[in-house]
Image (cartoon, rainbow, N blue to C red):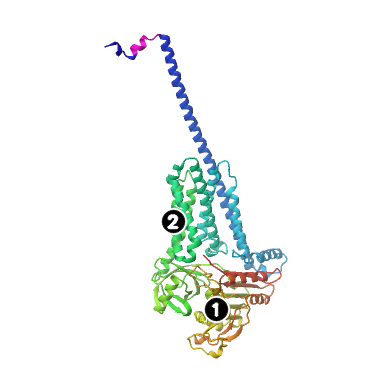
Amino acid sequence: MSSTSMTSTQISETVPATISSAISSTISSTISSAVSASASASAAAEAAEAASDAWLKTRQKLNTEVLTQYAAALSALIGVFIIAHWLHFISVQLGWDRLRNPLFFPFIALTRTSRRLLVRSLPGFTSVGHAILVLGYVGLNALFSFYRVDYSQPTNLAARFGWMATGNLVFVVFLALKNTPLAILTAYSYERLNVLHQIAGYATAIYMIIHGSIYSAYFIGAGRISVLREDVVTAGIILGFAMFTSVLAGMILRRFNYELFYIVHVILFILIAVTLGLHRPSFEEDQTLYATVIMAALWFADRLIRFCRLVYNSVNNEANVYALPNGGTRIVLKKPLSRARPGKHCYVWLPKIRAFETHPFTIVSSDPMELVINTYSGFTRDLHRHAMQNPGASLKVSVEGPYGTMPDPMNFDKVVFVAGGSGATFTFGLAADMLQRMPENSRQRIDFIWAVRKHENLTWFTQHLDNLRTHIHAPRIALKVHLTRLSQSPLNRDSSLERPSASDSSTTDLGPSALEKGPDYIAVSGPASSAATRYETDREDKDNMQDLDIPSASSSMTDLPVIVGRPDTEAEIKAAVRSMRKHQRVLIAACGPDRLTDTVRNVAATCISVDGPAVEVHCEQFGW
């Protein structure tokens, strides 16, 4: 072996011992320092990660506590209405408002003074009471959105908004339940909660948008855009867009095509529920998955109950459909619906017209089960066309329900029914049910006011009008039918009974109607409701009012007294209340669009007094 091929051992051996020792010491020190630095860095990283985990767990625990407190606050708000409803129910059943006992006077004074304010209409809201409820809901959201938030980190606020969005989403689903427990615990069924359902939906969408925007800006600014491509974040992005699209469809699409909106709404909700679960997929790390499961379970259970009812009520059930003049359709079902009461509404499935849709209509009569429907577009248009082409046709049918809450007319000494157009489906039903339940010695009185635009519409309720006029209690019924427009009917009519118009036109227009002033209308159970109506304002001048006997298409109605002109709703209601004694009770029930219900609410509010009769008002005004 050559000298240039010496091994390292051989080289080390030629180096002096002192130099070798120094080199070894230096290498050992360097290695020790490197190992120590690496260990320190690793320990620091582990400590930082542990601190971050502890901070995130602390924030999660705090947000969980705040969301629990928010849920408790919402429950307390609902509890106030439950307590108020049952106190009122007990007072009516025990007759406290009929007693002049000084012990009950403070309670009566307080409730009537508050109701005098709360039942009044308010622009943008159903009533002042409804506005206070909405403000309470908004106030709770504002409070818990910023309560105990650490503003040192912008993502803390984003996290809080995400939790609030989750909590509100569960509340949105709860308010949308057709079989809501609130229908039993309070005087509010699902359709009366629909406005709050919409507002809660808007709030949820706003929370989601802010939540996503803050997180996106934070990660992009920190150079961590890769985080936005993670699966859980992608699911959250899809969730946000689905929620935004759902709200946008509710604001725009439902005004033009409700049936299409409903389909889109359901599909988007399923997508929202799935992506919310994927966005926070763990029960242990993030408890929002519990909220997702609760929300989905509520929705599925409600759908299952409704589906089972449809299947059960479809067995051996058929319906005959009849076309009525001026766009009306009558449906008469073979089988009655359990617990059905006139004035409530049910969902109808007619697979011949729409195989995968159910539509809500007001129940006019429960034995036999009868529905009277006005024609607009979509389902009602196709149904009316089928009834015209196949008069009396028998169709496979099913119904589910009934839905709706209202005061029991039998608890009142006088009931004032006010309706416009096909809104009479609600009032005729209640009146017929009331007459059926009244004993022979009953002292109750009924004022029935109905305003209709065209004479042909009177034939929609021929049988019900005859019932009011020929019933044993007919002397206790003040029936007032107002015809707001005269038209030459092709039916056999005695022209001497009508005053000639000033022109040769076939129609006598008695002034601008709500229909002519705008396209807005209210459907009692949605756009396809049988109680959708347009109502003539009762505050315009009534120069042309006159009493005429105008015959209808039915010979049994040739002597029906019809008042030509718009009813003075305010004067009628005030007169009805003034005719009652202090210990008696009056119910004012109305069905129609905003202009009608606003008038009824405001007039009823002025009639509520501490030393007068007890006055209650119930308005069917179901919008979507």
The residue at which mark 2 appears reads as 270
Q: Nearer the viewer, mark 2 or mark 1?
A: 1
Q: Callout 1: 10 Å neighbours few (<14), some, many (20+)? A: many
**Residue 310 visible at all:** yes
Residue 572 placement (x, y as % from top left):
64, 77
| Secondary structure state at the residue bearing disc 1 | strand
Residue 414 placement (x, y as % from top left):
62, 75
Q: Which badge, 2 or 1, is on the more N-terminal residue?
A: 2
**Residue in the picture at 53% in, 53% down:** 206
Indicate left or right for 237 with 449 as reference. left
Q: Residue furthest front?
A: 503
Contact? badges 2 and 1 (CB < 8 Å): no
The residue at which mark 1 appears reads as 452
Relative to the observer, which residue lies in front, 49 or 343? Answer: 49
Q: Callout 2: 10 Å neighbours few (<14), some, many (20+)? A: some
346 vs 221: above or below: below
Q: Is residue 196 magenta?
A: no
Q: Residue furthest left?
A: 1
34 vs 213: above or below: above
Amino acid type shown at disc 1? Val
Magenta region: which residues? 9-16
Q: Give the tally of numbered discs.
A: 2
63 vs 493: above or below: above
**Residue in the picture at 52% in, 41% down:** 57
Q: Is residue 13 magenta?
A: yes
